[in-house]
């Protein structure tokens, strides 16, 4: 087997939210949606870049002293990192004594990554396994597929979280090696989708159809994250529900509550967050109401996250 | 006890609630007895309780689970009272039922730190290695906090000594001189600046361990002799198997088993220190030997960048990094092997444990700045097998993997692993279920012990301010 390389930004052990049992989640770098509310903004760009973590920094100035192109500077007593400068970032990362400068992601070959995720194999025995997330794992289909195959050959349960904005071939390459698929369907209306994510949802809709008519359709969970003003409207939930239940009435559909944690990461990647004031989570009643709408539009299996 | 319980329930002499009340009464009684320790001893074993230990669950002769109605009543009593005594222990094994396991987890979630969990899969075979008969090994009990003993036939002497491996390393690095007082505590076999290779350093370290072990054994013998002369315990001897038959007091070696347990303190700091030296000084050569020794002597004053590097640029024990964890394992094995050559004064074996109760604080006070970036006098890692607090950044599964590399035979006298979880984790049934799976893997990994603090930082800080008014 070829030793493929891929780009990932995190391997998180003891992930207890993405699927059954105790899991390890691999976060793939790169995503083609630009959701205004993105939770993993560091995963969007496919390019590797250096990051600066204020909390770890002891302001020793070693980086500034060794910076040759102005990538690290002192500004008003604060350390500032400019990732657009063509520094020898590896050297600066090595010089920094605290780990306050680090790459946001790493390139890794598939066998090495396989070895890394297998560290928790003793825990996978009890309904656990490995989840691919991101970013968008299906943007690196050969790499993802090979990793999943290695895992399945060892009897490890595999799952994916995908936004499905990829050519259908990518999906076809990976699907045979998956036990479980969490597929996002954020917004059904195309123009609304473009407003929120800057891209059309044509490919997503096509891929959803493919998934829900494939022999894995029972292992699929369609998910809609409830984002105030964007996805959390009665109209949107009704349209999604009608569409997916029209293809497969026993489809599993999950409505995810808003997670206000995302804001914390934004300053790291220099992006603007879509809300001035971070909204609160929806109440149980509100969530039940959305579930009821999905139900009355044909979905028999609706779930709300805890 | 279960036979009495069942007969009384059947004959309608007792209801389940009556039984619970009786159990809770004795639980309260356990908390009334306070053991006044002197100042020094109180530092090492902080917290007043004596350490009544009650174990539930565990496996019988056919490997089936031993739990019964009373096991559940014990858990319920703990859930109601949430007091520090007794030390309620659940013995886990492969056939522990989901019901007992999950009920125990629900009680852990209440935050009293109890019950703690012991692992039959680790402890029973490890006791056999120690020449304990299988029937006695299967019937093991726990003394005090985490010390393992057979029942009714043993003088375990489980607190024979605590051996500060980190002090031995300090003397190795500083030519036998104490970093805190400058006193020459051991021979000068060289110092960090004279060890040309990491192996040289290891050889000197080995010599220091050997010599202090010799001294420790002599001290233990004197104490045992003094007990025989000054403090024989005829009443105790009368209830310990073989003493009457042999006509020998338990302090003089009358019991069936005559063990002495020595604690190895603390493998986490030791692994972190040696890993830092190995990588930064000898392999990458980023840090000079003179520079590091100077920094240690000055408690890192003026060496803040070096200290940051030691803390951040070398992986730490507890993150499932093979080469780092194996340094800890290597020295624990060495110590265990070495002490196995000695016999105690009663003719029994020395063996080892890894627990400190609160001794990691005073034992840290006695150690100068260390190459893991720890400042002079600061506490060592807590527990005994736990990573240094805050340094386990790869999550709880990685901690278990690291700890599992310590062979079960290293902790026949008791091992202690502390972990901390937030109460939120236990709020849902999914959370409880995942925690149960976590503990099932703990059993598979043959780790002897684990216990949990389930608290929020904010509550602890608030409790510090107004001790009376806070529900943790
Ligand atoms: S080298 Fe690292 S710790 Fe020092 S100022 Fe730069 S970022 Fe901060």
Image (cartoon, rainbow, N blue to C red):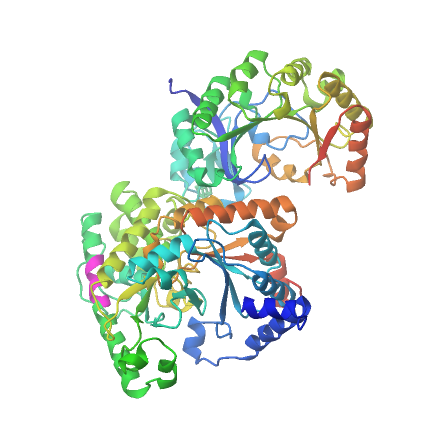
Q: Is residue A252 visible?
A: yes
* Residue B113 % position (x, y): 55, 61
Which corner quadrant holds the C terminus of chain A? top right
Q: Is residue A288 on the magenta stretch?
A: no
Q: Is residue B248 left or right of residue A23?
A: left
Looking at this view, name the residue that lies furthest to the front: B11
Which corner quadrant holds the N terminus of chain A? top left
Question: In which quadrant of the rendered view does residue A244 lie?
Answer: top right
Q: Is residue B425 left or right of residue A231?
A: left
User: The magenta stretch spans which residues?
Assistant: B205-213
Q: Is residue B210 on the magenta stretch?
A: yes
| Image label count | 0
Q: Image point 17% across, 60% down: which residue?
A: B189
* Residue A52 % position (x, y): 51, 37
Quick one: A2 or B117, which is closer to the camera?
Answer: B117
Looking at this view, name the residue that lies furthest to the bottom: B230
Q: Image point 56% across, 44% down: which residue?
A: B434
Quick one: B456 or B373, which is closer to the camera?
Answer: B456
Magenta segment, prevailing SS (helix, strand or loop): helix
Question: Taking B123 as reference, is A126 above or below it?
Answer: above
Question: In which quadrant of the rendered view does residue B18 lie?
Answer: bottom right
Quick one: A53 or A24, which is closer to the camera?
Answer: A24
* Residue A92 % position (x, y): 41, 35
Question: In which quadrant of the rendered view does residue B156 lie?
Answer: bottom left
Question: Taking B310 as reference, is B185 above or below it?
Answer: below
Q: Image point 51% across, 52% down: which residue?
A: B96
Question: Taking B299 as reference, is A109 above or below it?
Answer: above
Q: Is residue A62 left or right of residue B201?
A: right
Q: Is residue B194 left or right of residue A220?
A: left
């Amino acid at each position: 087997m070829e030793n493929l390389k891929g780009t990932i930004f995190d391997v998180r052990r003891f992930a207890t939210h993405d699927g059954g049992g105790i899991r390890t989640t691999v976060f793939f770098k790169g995503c083609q949606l630009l959701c205004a509310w993105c939770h993993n903004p560091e995963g969007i760009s496919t390019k590797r870049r250096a990051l600066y973590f204020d909390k770890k920094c002891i302001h020793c100035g070693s980086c500034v002293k060794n910076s040759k192109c102005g990538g690290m500077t002192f500004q008003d007593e604060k350390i500032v990192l400019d990732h657009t400068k063509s520094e020898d970032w590896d050297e600066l990362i090595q010089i920094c004594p605290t780990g306050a400068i680090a790459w946001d992601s790493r390139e890794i070959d598939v066998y090495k990554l396989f070895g890394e995720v297998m560290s928790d194999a003793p825990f996978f025995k009890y309904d656990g396994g490995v989840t691919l997330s991101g970013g968008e794992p299906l943007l690196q289909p050969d790499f993802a597929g090979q990793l999943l195959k290695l895992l399945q050959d060892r009897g490890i349960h595999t799952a994916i979280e995908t936004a499905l904005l990829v050519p259908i071939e990518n999906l076809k390459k990976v699907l045979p090696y998956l036990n479980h698929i969490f597929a996002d369907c954020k917004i059904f209306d195309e123009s609304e989708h473009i407003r929120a994510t800057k891209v059309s949802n044509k490919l997503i809709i096509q891929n959803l159809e493919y998934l829900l008519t494939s022999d894995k359709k029972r292992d699929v969970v369609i998910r809609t994250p409830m984002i105030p003003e964007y996805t959390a409207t009665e109209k949107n939930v009704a349209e999604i529900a009608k569409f997916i239940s029209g293809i497969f009435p026993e489809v599993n559909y999950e409505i995810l509550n808003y997670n206000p944690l995302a804001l914390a990461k934004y300053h790291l990647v220099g992006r603007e967050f879509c809300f001035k004031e971070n909204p609160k989570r929806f109440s149980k009643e509100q969530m039940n109401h959305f579930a009821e709408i999905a139900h009355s539009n044909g979905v028999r299996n609706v779930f709300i996250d805890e | 006890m279960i036979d009495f319980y069942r007969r009384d329930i059947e004959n309608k002499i007792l209801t389940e609630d009556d039984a619970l009340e009786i159990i809770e009464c004795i639980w309260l009684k356990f908390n009334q007895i306070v053991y006044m320790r002197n100042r020094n001893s109180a530092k090492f074993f902080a917290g007043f309780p004596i350490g009544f230990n009650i174990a539930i669950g565990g496996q019988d002769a056919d490997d089936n689970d031993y739990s019964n109605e009373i096991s559940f009543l014990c858990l319920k009593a703990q859930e109601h009272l949430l007091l520090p005594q007794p030390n309620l222990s659940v013995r886990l094994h492969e056939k522990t039922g989901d019901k007992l396991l999950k009920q125990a987890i629900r009680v852990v979630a209440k935050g009293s730190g109890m019950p703690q969990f012991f692992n039959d899969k680790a402890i029973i075979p490890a006791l056999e290695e120690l020449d304990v008969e299988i029937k006695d090994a299967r019937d093991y009990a726990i003394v005090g906090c985490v010390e393992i003993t057979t029942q009714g036939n043993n003088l375990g002497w489980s607190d024979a000594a605590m051996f500060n491996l980190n002090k031995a390393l300090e003397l190795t690095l500083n030519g036998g001189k104490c970093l805190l007082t400058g006193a020459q505590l051991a021979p000068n076999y060289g110092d960090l600046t004279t060890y040309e290779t990491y192996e040289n350093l290891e050889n000197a370290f080995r010599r220091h361990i050997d010599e202090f072990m010799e001294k420790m054994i002599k001290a233990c013998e004197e104490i045992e002799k003094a007990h025989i002369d000054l403090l024989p315990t005829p009443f105790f001897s009368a209830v310990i198997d073989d003493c009457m038959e042999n006509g020998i007091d338990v302090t003089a070696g009358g019991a069936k088993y005559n063990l002495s347990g020595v604690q190895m303190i603390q493998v986490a700091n030791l692994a972190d220190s040696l890993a830092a030296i190995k990588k930064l000084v000898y392999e990458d050569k980023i840090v000079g030997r003179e520079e590091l020794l100077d920094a240690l002597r000055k408690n890192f004053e003026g060496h803040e960048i070096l200290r940051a590097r030691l803390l951040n640029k070398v992986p730490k024990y507890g993150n499932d990094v093979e080469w780092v964890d194996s340094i800890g394992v290597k020295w624990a094995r060495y110590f265990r092997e070495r002490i196995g050559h000695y016999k105690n004064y009663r003719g029994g074996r020395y063996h080892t444990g890894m627990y400190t109760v609160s001794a990691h604080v005073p034992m840290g006070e006695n150690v100068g700045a260390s190459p893991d970036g720890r400042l002079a006098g600061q506490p060592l890692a807590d527990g005994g097998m736990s990573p240094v607090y805050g340094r386990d950044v790869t999550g709880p599964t990685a901690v278990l993997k690291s700890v599992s590399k310590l062979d079960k035979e290293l902790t026949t006298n008791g091992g202690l692993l502390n972990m901390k979880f937030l109460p939120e984790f236990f709020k849902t049934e999914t959370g409880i279920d995942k925690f149960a799976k976590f503990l099932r893997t703990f059993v598979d990994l043959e780790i002897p012990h684990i216990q949990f603090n389930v608290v929020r930082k904010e509550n602890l800080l608030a409790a510090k301010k107004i001790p009376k008014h806070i529900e943790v």
